[in-house]
Image (tube, rainbow, N blue to C red):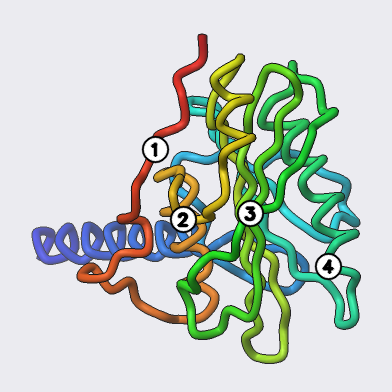
Amino acid sequence: MLRICLIVICCLILWTSAISQRITRKGCRVGEAEFSCPKNFTRAPLEPASRFAIFIRNKPGVGLFVASPEPGFDEQRLIDEIIKATLARAFPKESLTFQWKRLKAMDHISRFESAGGVLHGFNGELLVQIKYRRIRVRDREFLIGYTAELGRGAQAKESLEIASGADSLESIAGCQAIVEIIYSITDEKIDRANDPCSLDVIAAPKPV
């Protein structure tokens, strides 16, 4: 009898642990929207009234953002606000005065994707990339994306001048994280035979 009780208790503990892990895995929120918490990222503190969430991975320097704005929102205004906040937290010691260049549009990774954008920015020393996607599902809009370091110094400036295509560079950490977040919202599954993060991938440079 004692043995049966111990087995039952162990099963309950394992079940509770599994449930807890699932809640933690899909326990992130922005507004009323819930999505999977990105692995190996830390949520940055923001004002309670913020319309978006930011997650930071310091090594390498990558910042994610997830927004669930109200209908009729100004996309450019919101993106400008998100980019500034994300860069300030991903690169707190860097100047936020960037020269920006918009690149060609990306291929869609979700059937719920309606638009997106790719920008490269250079502040005189640091070159960063911003990639974001606009998702509409169940009458709710989302802006989901990341920023990542592409390089530094003269070579980074040269890269900014010659960059034209959106899909030539990718942060594997940023790409994989936003794919997981998007698919946790849309209930889609990753097609391993056509992995959206299997392009010419770069890892963000190691901090000097």
Mark nearer the N terminus (1 vs 3): 3
Neighbourhood count class around disc 2 (C-alpha, 10 Å): few under 14, some 14–19, many 20 upward: some
Relative to 101, residue 186 above or below: below
Mark 3 Cα shell of 10 Å, populated few (<14), some (14-19), many (≥20):
some
Q: Residue at x 46, y 72 (%)?
A: 109
| CB contact under 8 Å: marks 3 and 2 | no
Q: Residue at x 25, y 60 (%)?
A: 9
Classify residue 157 by image quadrant.
top right
Whether tag 1 and tag 4 are in contact, CB under 8 A, the answer is: no
Q: Are marks 3 and 4 in contact (CB under 8 Å)?
A: no
Residue 207: x, y in percent? 51, 15
In the depicted view, which residue is nearer to us: 134 or 42? Answer: 134
Do tag 1 and tag 3 residues touch (Cβ < 8 Å)? no
For marks 1 and 2 on the same chain, the one whose residue lies earlier in the sequence = 2
State the mark number for residue 103. Answer: 3
User: In front: mark 1 or mark 3?
Assistant: 3
Could you tell me residue 199's position as x and y percent?
Answer: 34, 54
Q: Looking at the picture, which amino acid does disc 4 mark?
A: Glu
Q: Nearer the viewer, residue 104 or 126?
A: 104
Label 3 residue SS: loop
Sequence-earlier tag: 1 or 4: 4
The residue positioned farthest toward the top in the image shown: 208
Q: For mark 1, what is the residue?
A: 202
Residue receiving disc 2: 167
- Amino acid carrying label 2: it is Asp
**First in residue order: circle 2 vs circle 4:** 4
Give residue 54's position: percent from left, percent from top: 69, 47
Q: CA distance from mark 1 to mark 3?
A: 17 Å
How far apart, in angstroms, are the residues tagged by discs 1 and 2? 11 Å
Q: Is residue 16 above or below residue 183?
A: above
